[in-house]
Image (cartoon, rainbow, N blue to C red):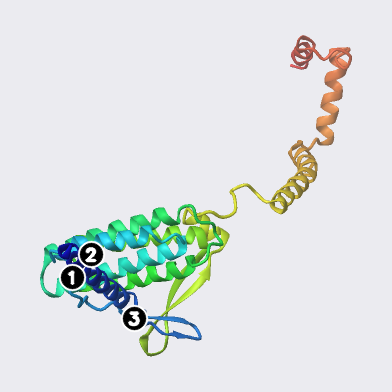
Amino acid sequence: MKTSKTLFTGLFVLGLLCLSGIAAAQEDTSVTDTSGTVLTDDILPYDGPIGAGSPLYGLKIAMEDIDESFTTNQSERVDKQIGHGRLRIAEVRRALELNQSDSARQALDLYWQKMNLTRSTIAPFGSNATGLLHAQEQIVKHQFVLEQLLLSHPNNTGLQRAYNNSLELEEKFSEKTAMHFNRSAGKDNKTILKAIKLEHKEMEQNGKPGVTSQPSVTETQEKQTEWEKNQNKKPVSDTTTTITTQPTVTGNQQQGHQSNDSLTGNSGNNGNADTKGKGNSQNK
């Protein structure tokens, strides 16, 4: 009985430690001005008691998964998954500072798995689902932090894969929200993040749902009108060509033709090849 109580107390304390670490990792320190959100490298190295490489790290991950599973609200579940992904990035940063390559690789693999799970979670969402745009913004912030880590660790394939995975996830969010987060330079060399609605053409070029490839009614009418104009122009063009290509007949040539007709007899009544041949031979 005492052993069970001690185990329960230990699990409870462990759960509190895990949740406190998650809350710290989820804290968003970015600020917002009139033009958008200021992007900052705000995911600090993890400083909790159970980081990647710890003997209790597997239990910590299992408790996070259980917490997500018991979250019935889909939007809240996505927020938790993205928060856990943010925590993985914090653990990666801590492991890289300590030159613990195995621990960093472990945390990066778990980040990759969590983002794939998030992609599956949002698959059935409608375009008007609440919280999607906020979740998409958090993914873009992940990308910004991963970019900074790649600058200091350019040969880390795990970081590159995690960054590519976040790009793919953002694209899935864009398919739902029809929004894209654009970066621009603000005051004091700050990077400003602003949501911009995707145009139909841009969505089609990116392979995202937009207007269909069928021509619109207006485009069809314009093409029909243009075709009718071309048809009206064709007879004029043909007549002009026929007139300009006919040879000019002089007075002497007309007299020569009349004499040929008189020599051939009735060439005007039967214009077969034999009669014309006889007339030509008589002229000669």
Q: SS for tag 1?
A: loop
Which image quadrant for residue 7?
Answer: bottom left
Give the camera-side residue of 225 and 236.
225
> Which amino acid, mark 2?
Lys
- Mark 1 crowd level (few <14, some 14–19, many ≥20, 10 Å Cα): some
User: Which is in the foreground here, disc 3 or disc 2?
Assistant: 2
**Separation of marks 1 and 2 at Cα, in angstroms:** 8 Å
Q: Please report the residue visible at 43 percent of the width from the left and 71 percent of the height from the top.
A: 137
Label 2 near label 1: C-beta < 8 Å? Answer: yes
| Between discs 1 and 3, the one toward the N terminus | 3
Q: SS for tag 2?
A: helix
| Between discs 3 and 2, the one toward the N terminus | 3
Which image quadrant for residue 77?
Answer: bottom left
| Between discs 1 and 2, the one toward the N terminus | 1
Give the camera-side residue of 230 and 62.
62
Quarter occupied by the C terminus: top right
Q: Is residue 4 left or right of residue 244?
A: left
Quarter occupied by the N terminus: bottom left
Percent x, y for residue 192? 42, 80
Circle 2 sits on which residue?
60
> Which amino acid, mark 3?
Thr
In the rendered image, the vertical position of residue 140 relative to residue 269, given as above or below: below
Q: Is residue 19 left or right of residue 119?
A: left
> Which amino acid, mark 1?
Ile
Circle 3 sits on which residue?
40
In the rendered image, the vertical position of residue 66 relative to residue 27, given as above or below: above
Q: Please report the residue visible at 35 percent of the width from the left and 55 percent of the height from the top.
A: 117
Circle 1 sits on which residue?
50
